[in-house]
Image: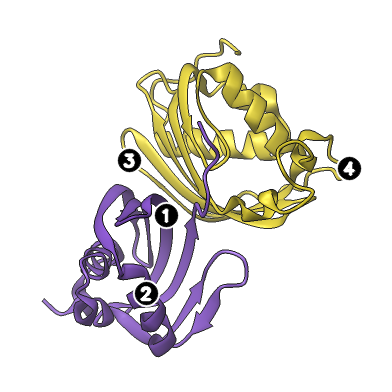
């Protein structure tokens, strides 16, 4: 099935599974050329090349992703997940992806960069 | 905690939106009415069990809030997931994601909060000197509404 026929939630979950398992070619197939990324603080970029470069760095050392919650509608999907990385432990993240014509046009990421002791 | 019992039919998303609007506009009494006594909270600055500890943390954050812009909000039969930008007096805009688990009683039993707390960890904003602990100087604005 062509990605343009998939729901934003289906695309978000397939994209997350792909990059988290280091299948960056598959992940790239869901990304629009003009994607805009909005991360914590001043981490922002536009364009698929920069976005996928950063995604490749993030994917290094990922051992698995545990999806905690995922919802979507006709235009957007939000996924909250725990990212487990070798030597770095677990990092909680959430993404809001805006999808059009089967491609991710906007990615807003929030994550916990440091955690206070319980 | 308030003993108000919300409608059993209230959808988790409705509970989440009402709760979020309440605490972000400094109406902590209304916010408390949505919270179960045994709430489990998991956030970057606090992990706790019980409504007392939960509200101590929420009250400190609420004092800081000047506005909240809802970016996305969804729910099903027992959860709600939201992303929003929180405007604060001391830390600027904090982008947050919150997943709330709602029981059949219409109360929030679990809250997982994700945001980058690095701005709160910078010099002068440590736990001992955090403006989060001080009263806010700016009244809250109400931006909540779109979703």
Q: Earlier in the sequence, mark 4 or mark 3?
A: 3
Q: Is residue B85 above or below residue A8?
A: above
Q: Nearer the viewer, mark 2 or mark 3?
A: 2
Residue identifier under label 1: A93
Q: A12 or B125: nearer the eye?
A: B125
Marks 4 and 3 sit apart, C-alpha to C-alpha, by 38 Å
Q: Earlier in the sequence, mark 2 or mark 1?
A: 2
Q: Which dot marks residue A57?
A: 2
Q: From what the image shows, is residue A42 above or below residue B118?
A: below
Q: Quadrant of residue A88?
A: bottom left
Front of the two marks 3 and 1 = 1
Residue A111 shows in this picture: yes
Seen at 45% across and 20% down, the residue is B7
Q: Where does the image place residue B72, in percent across and percent down from the top left? A: 48, 56
Pointer 4: what residue?
B137
Mark 1 chain: A
Q: Which chain is yellow?
A: B
Q: Residues within 10 Å of mark 2 (few under 14, many from 20)?
A: few
């Amino acid at each position: 099935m062509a990605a343009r026929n998939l729901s934003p939630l289906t695309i978000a979950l397939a994209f997350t599974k792909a990059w988290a398992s280091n299948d960056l070619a598959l992940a790239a197939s869901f990304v629009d050329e003009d994607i805009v990324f909005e991360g914590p603080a001043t981490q922002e970029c536009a364009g698929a090349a920069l976005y996928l470069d950063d995604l490749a760095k993030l994917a290094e050392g990922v051992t698995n992703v545990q999806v905690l919650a995922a919802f979507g509608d006709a235009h957007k999907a939000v996924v909250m997940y725990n990212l487990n990385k070798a030597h770095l432990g677990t990092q909680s993240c959430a993404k809001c992806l805006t999808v059009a014509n089967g491609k991710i046009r906007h990615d807003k990421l929030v994550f916990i960069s440091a955690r206070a002791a319980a | 905690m308030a003993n108000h019992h919300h409608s059993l039919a209230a959808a988790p998303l409705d509970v989440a939106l009402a709760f979020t609007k309440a605490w972000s506009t400094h109406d902590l009494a209304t916010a408390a009415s949505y919270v179960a006594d045994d709430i489990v909270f998991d956030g970057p600055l606090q992990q706790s069990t019980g409504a007392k500890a939960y509200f101590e943390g929420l009250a400190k954050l609420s004092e800081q809030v000047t506005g909240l812009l809802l970016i996305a909000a969804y729910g099903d039969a027992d959860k709600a997931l939201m992303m929003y930008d929180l405007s604060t007096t001391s830390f600027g805009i904090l982008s947050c994601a919150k997943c709330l688990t709602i029981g059949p009683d219409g109360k929030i039993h679990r809250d997982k909060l994700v945001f980058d707390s690095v701005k709160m960890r910078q010099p002068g904003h440590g736990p001992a000197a955090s403006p989060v602990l001080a009263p806010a100087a700016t009244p809250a604005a109400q931006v909540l509404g779109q979703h």
